[in-house]
Amino acid sequence: MSDQHQCGPCTACCQGWLRIRVGEALVAPGHPCPHIGSRGCAIYTERPHSCKAFNCAWLINDLDYPDWLRPDNAKVILKYIDIGTGTNVIGAIPTGTKVPPRVLNFLKELSRQHNLPVLHFERRKEQGRYLPEVNVTGFGPPGMQHLFARIQNKLKGLEQMADDAPPGGG
Ligand code: SF4
Ligand code: SF4
């Protein structure tokens, strides 16, 4: 297993791309967490459980993710998702509207090498504001479509920071 990465200057998971409620604040696209600053999380030791439980794939680095894939640089957050079927899935959540093509190409190869299902999210903007709905598509090993069908009703919540995070609105 590769060494864990360090966040360094990245704060992507606190910028609202992952939906989370922190106290009274809804953190969602267009609404960064009020506790993030130039020196990181201002309430680090008291941050919510969903922040502590967030499993950033690039940070964990169990699959030897390249440096360029750091979320603030690659414009995507990769999150391991336990969908409750004994299968770990990678969720690719853009820091914007779409997962960049370079990242998708990397994930296709990763999926092929490790037999890993990948879900990638896409958002839409209207009049400069992100809509709360996300489109989710994916690729992966044979049987993947069957897996997608089983988790359709869970897809909306999968962009949350952790699987037990409270649901967010728009
Ligand atoms: S997205 Fe990952 S690398 Fe970036 S700050 Fe969050 S945990 Fe660290
Ligand atoms: S409370 Fe959570 S989302 Fe907010 S800055 Fe701290 S770690 Fe990031």
Image (spheres, grey):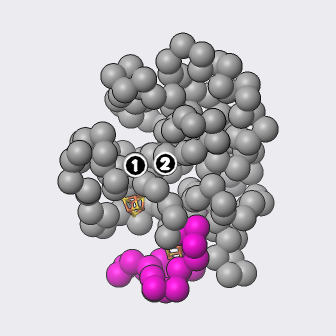
- Left or right: 107 with respect to 135? left
Give the number of marks. Answer: 2
> Is 92 rendered above or below residue 23?
above
* Residue at position x 48%, y 48% in the image: 79
Q: Quadrant of the N terminus?
A: top left
Residue drawn at point x = 42 percent, y = 23 percent: 115
Please say if 26 is above or below 156.
below
Taking depth in this image into account, of 30 and 49 the one nearest to the observer is: 49
SS type, badge 1: helix
Q: On the rendered structure, is 100 left or right of 61?
A: right
Q: Position of residue 140 (x, y in %)?
A: 50, 21
Dots 2, 1 in contact, CB < 8 A = yes
Which type of secondary structure does the marked residue at label 2 adopt? strand
Residue at the spot of label 2: 79
Mark before the other along the chain sequence, 2 or 1: 1
| Residue sticking out furthest to the top | 142
Magenta range is 28-51
Left-right relation of 79 to 58? right
* Distance between the alpha carbons at the discs numbered 2 and 1: 5 Å
Residue 149's disc is none
Q: Position of residue 99 (x, y in %)?
A: 49, 37
The quarter of the displayed image where residue 113 is located: top left
Q: In which quarter of the image is the C terminus?
A: bottom right
Q: Which residue is the site of mark 1?
A: 57
- Residue 74 x %, y %: 36, 45
Crowd band around label 2 with a 10 angstrom C-alpha radius: few (<14), some (14–19), many (20+): many
Q: Does the magenta stretch include residue 131?
A: no
Report the amino acid beneath label 2. Lys
Pointer 2 residue Cβ closer than 8 Å to ligand 1:
no
Relative to 32, say whether 80 is above or below: above
The quarter of the image that holds ligand 1 is bottom left
